Amino acid sequence: MGFRRHGPFRAGDQVQLTDPKNKRHTITLKEDGVFHTHKGAIPHSELIGQPEGSVVRSSGGTQYLAFRHLLQDYTLAMPRGAAVIYPKDASMIVGMADIFPGARVIEAGVGSGALTCFLLRAVGPDGHVTSYERRQEFADVASKNVEKFFGGPMDDNWRLVVGDLVASIDEADVDRVILDMLAPWECVDAAAKALTPGGVICCYVATTTQLSKTVETIRDHGCFTEPHAWETLVRDWHVEGLAVRPDHRMIGHTGFLVSARRMADGVTPPPRRRRPKGTTEEL
């Protein structure tokens, strides 16, 4: 599963070249390939056989730092049919939904395949991801992006279904269901039927209206624990000597995440404890 992620560069590797202004270019190495830029050309042969972290110089004299790209870099630069889930949200889904090696995962709303790459790498060679996508054009883009990142087809670990989740789902006893769509509340019942007791549902939505509808639907369904809703904000810092300050720009709101766990069949969740109106005192 996947191409080699360490050792000297070889033909077929995807390599990220970063110039002095931190502009990044991803190329796939070929024996006779040449990377052309307005700052000069770099024959691929100058990279093949070199270790990661090498520096190559273009014919125009510009130096480039060469590494295999990280998944977060790849997903931000991949061709898009639909908007991609940002790495900060994809990593939270993998972590907070506890996507583990060997897990069986359903994903609905494959988009451009960014989250799919994170899920496939998290489940590993013994796990499996089934992705549902309603639009054929998005599925085609996602398939190409996933195969490019992993270096070939993922037939043993990934099934891509073009169709609606509710109408097409045929899995049972899955460990996780990840919903990235406009109306995830429409799929909560299907997710409950597919999930094994203890499994996790995790939904990604963009607006507060969607957030409210998703939370209330999961809460009212009766098969899940109290849903947990949150968002993640990322702020870089400028650190140079004693000049330490937050960057002027940050990755703010991209979406909300909602997660809950599937309870055993026939179990009623305990009533929620609420604060009485007009007081902050906890019950």
Image (cartoon, rainbow, N blue to C red):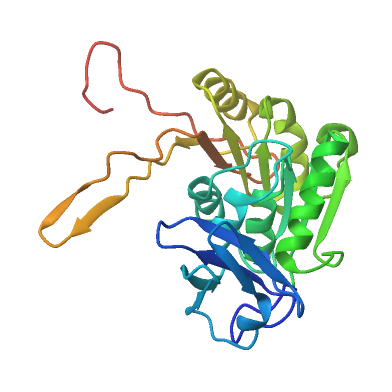
**Residue 166 locus on image (x, y percent):** 83, 33
Give residue 50's position: percent from left, percent from top: 57, 86
Whether residue 159 is visible to the viewer of this picture, yes or no, is yes
The residue closer to the viewer here, 130 or 139, is 139
In the rendered image, the vertical position of residue 189 relative to residue 159, given as above or below: above
Judge left or right: residue 11 versus residue 205: right
Q: Is residue 268 above or below residue 139?
A: above
Q: Residue at x 66, y 46 (%)?
A: 264
In the rendered image of this protein, does residue 274 appear above or below residue 255?
Answer: above
Q: Quadrant of the C terminus?
A: top left
Which quadrant of the figure has residue 147?
bottom right
Q: Residue furthest left?
A: 242
Answer whether residue 173 is visible to the viewer in this image. Answer: no
Q: Position of residue 261 (x, y in %)?
A: 58, 45
**Along the viewing direction, whichever of 188 and 203 lies nearer the viewer:** 203
- Tell which residue pokes out farthest to the top in this image: 278
Q: Residue at x 54, y 66 (%)?
A: 17
- What residue is rendered at 74% in x and 31% in y? 187
Based on the displayed image, in which of its 4 quarters is residue 22 positioned?
Answer: bottom left
Residue 254 picture location, percent across and down: 49, 34
Q: Residue at x 80, y 64 (%)?
A: 157
